[in-house]
Amino acid sequence: QLERVHVQTLRAEALPKMAHHYSVTALSASPDGRRLVSADARGLLVFWNLANTVTAKPFTQEFAIISMSFSADGKTLAAGSTRSTKKENHAALQLWNAGDAAKPQLVQDLRLRSAAFGVSLSPDGTTVAYSQNASVLVQSMSPKPRAAQVLQGRTRPVLRVAFAAEEPFYRIAFGSRPNADGTIALERSFNLATVKLEAAPQVREKDWVAPK
């Protein structure tokens, strides 16, 4: 059961039960808070319109989406999945046109050899970063996908990835340690221009764009 909680009043409002009957594996809200996308363990992906009357547009897929991220303008959604035996044991990295919750469209659907965690979409909506074990992969999605750039700099699995909030967008931060409250702090950053880890000053949350 999904609930929408109003932060100022802490009033909880249950969303329709018809959507998910299995464990929810990922959630992402648009920057304006008017749309929500949810995914579950059986491959159901639901686009919610939360403005005025709540409506839902479901899609059934053959893998479970485990990480999602909206673009800064709320028009594009990036999503990463687990591997699926129905897809020759491959995972997926997807881009959706999500500007209209009633008519979302799958724009790109790339096959991956491993699950995609910590998906983050660049502010300009052209590049997706995600993690696979201790590596961060950067995939250009526009106008035509190219081979992903692989960044390695940790021994622990990377759990969160984030793009710089302002230009230049070729900087990526990442985190691998869960906090007591379940959030994951950003620890270090990569410079994609030099393909090197940057010096290790404190990484400030406000400088980066990604779910916690």
Image (cartoon, rainbow, N blue to C red):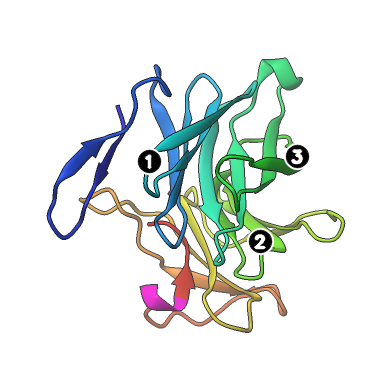
Label 2 Cα crowd, 10 Å radius (few <14 / some 14-19 / many 20+): some
Secondary element at image label 3: strand
Residue wearing tag 2: 151
> Relative to residue 156, is residue 94 drawn left or right?
right
Q: Residue at x 34, y 22 (%)?
A: 17
Considering the image in quadrants, where does the N terminus appear?
top left
- The amino acid type, in three-letter code, at marker 2 is Leu
Which residues fall within the magenta stretch? Answer: 203-207
Find residue 98 and report its horizontal and vertical position in percent.
61, 49
- The amino acid type, in three-letter code, at marker 1 is Thr
Q: Which image quadrant for residue 212?
A: bottom left
Label 1 vs label 3: CA separation? 31 Å
Task: Give 55 or 121, whichever is nearer the viewer.
Answer: 55
Q: Can the viewer see residue 203? A: no
**Residue 83 - label:** none
**Residue 53 - label:** 1
Find residue 73 and report its horizontal and vertical position in percent.
56, 66
The mark that comes first in sequence, 1 or 3, is 1
Label 1 vs label 2: CA separation? 44 Å
- The amino acid type, in three-letter code, at marker 3 is Asp
**Residue 109 - label:** 3
Label 1 Cα crowd, 10 Å radius (few <14 / some 14-19 / many 20+): few
Secondary element at image label 1: loop
Q: Residue at x 56, y 23 (%)?
A: 43
